[in-house]
Amino acid sequence: MKLKQITFIKVSLLSLGIGTAFAQQPELSQLDQLKINQIQVLGTHNSYARPVDPRLAAYADPIFSKMSEKMATLFPPDKLSSFKEFHPNPMTMSEGLKYDHPAFDVQLDSGIRSLEMDVYYDPTGHRFDRPAGYEVLNKMGVSDLAPYQKEELEKPGFKMLHIADFDFRSHYASFRSGLIALRAWSEKNPGHLPVFIMVEAKDKGIPLFPNSADILPFDEKAFDELDAEVVEVLGKEKLITPDNIRGDYSTLREAVRAGHWPSVKASRGKFIFLLLPTTAGMNLESAYTKNRPNLEKRMMFVQSNPNDSFASFVLLDNALVRQQEIQDLVRAGYIVRSRSDIETYEAKINDYSRADAAFNSGAQIVSTDFFRPGNGYHTSYYVKLPNSKVARPNPINSMMKKSKHMGSVK
């Protein structure tokens, strides 16, 4: 191959956000003897999302602001405190959405090993195919709005979007199409490190506009269908499930605290699903755990309190506030997700303090909206693992004594 051709290929990879370090790098075989809770990976937030049409964002900003002011007066003190922890900085809605993710394969090829998929229950179809925000602007004479996948939204099935009627543009309008993309990438990269998939079950809407979509709750039947779709598309052989981890322990929590996670080597080529059972993870009571105190026969681990019988996955996004708590949970065996930036604030002011706190906390998954150079604020902010690789040994628990149970996922 001529030098000019090599240079062209290298430039093309970089322009796609695929650094040659990740395009050519073997996936860290030195991690194979660690367990999957003893590594740290970088993930993305709202990984499927495409940008909101700027005219819709500008129209909705003042509506969101007024609604947020009213909501703050309605929250009970404990819920308000929790909300402020997860949303610590005053940002307009359009600022909070000032990111632009590529398709799943580009993210995964760039070294991302955790993706987030938000799902809405739509068993009949047509629930989201006529977004109310676009209807409002159409009546105002605005017709050249950013395109979206209307035909796929018309069909029955779980839909993948952020906020109905407003932030609905997605690389994958259905959950199924997102799963198919994961399967295709995995088949092309059979030795990949395990990929953590966070699923948020969206059970509430934000009625910004007239005729907003009626959002269905996730009942037991809906969750059964969600699990079934994961198995149907990916295959159970590609999943690490709660039953795999519990083994002979009486509770999932006991297994987790005993370190009964599989090794990285045994988990290559697999996915581990982590469920936020309600919108924004604000309520942990869910039909997903009904009559399943240890997530028996479920396909996903679920956001939990550390003392729940099914405790395995904890969401603590604000590492600036919760760093010590995260470290304690990681040492105890739990998997934790935290964020390096929240609602784009850190990119706006070019501040790495939250990212540093998240990495130092030992949270196994650190999620960002900016995994490569270039952002809407034109700052130099972007996030990579401290070792600049696909994964690294967890700074908190990777040196802990390995359990005799470490082995394959059955």
Image: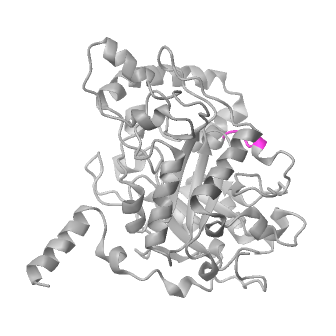
What secondary structure is the stretch in magenta mostly built from? loop
* Count of numbered circles in the view: 0
Q: What stretch is highlighted in magenta?
A: 282-287
Residue 126 pos. (x, y %): 51, 27
Left or right: 271, with 351 as reference point: right
Residue 156 place in picture, x, y as percent: 56, 35
Position of 122 relative to 211 (above/below)? below
Say whether residue 410 is left or right of residue 249: left
Dividing the picture into quadrants, the one containing residue 309 is: bottom right
User: Residue 97: x, y in percent?
Assistant: 40, 40
Which residue is at the front of the view, 223 or 282? 223
Q: Which residue sits at x=27%, y=61%?
A: 16
Q: In which quarter of the image is the N terminus?
A: bottom left
**Eyeballing the image, is 147 above or below 109?**
above
124 left or right of 373 in image: right
Q: Which colour scheme is used?
A: one colour
Regarding residue 51, the answer to whether it shows in the image is yes
The picture places residue 260, in percent across and down from the top left corner, at 76, 75
The relative height of residue 25 versus residue 248 in the rendered view (above or below) is below
**Nearest the eye: 365 or 113:** 113
Q: Which residue does the image show at 14% across and 72% down from the upper left?
A: 8
Residue at point 44%, 46% (across, down) = 172
| Residue situated in front as seen by the camera: 79 or 26 | 26
Q: Is residue 286 visible?
A: no
- Decide whether residue 203 is among the magenta residues: no
* Viewer-nearest residue: 32 or 95: 32
Quadrant into which the C terminus falls: bottom right
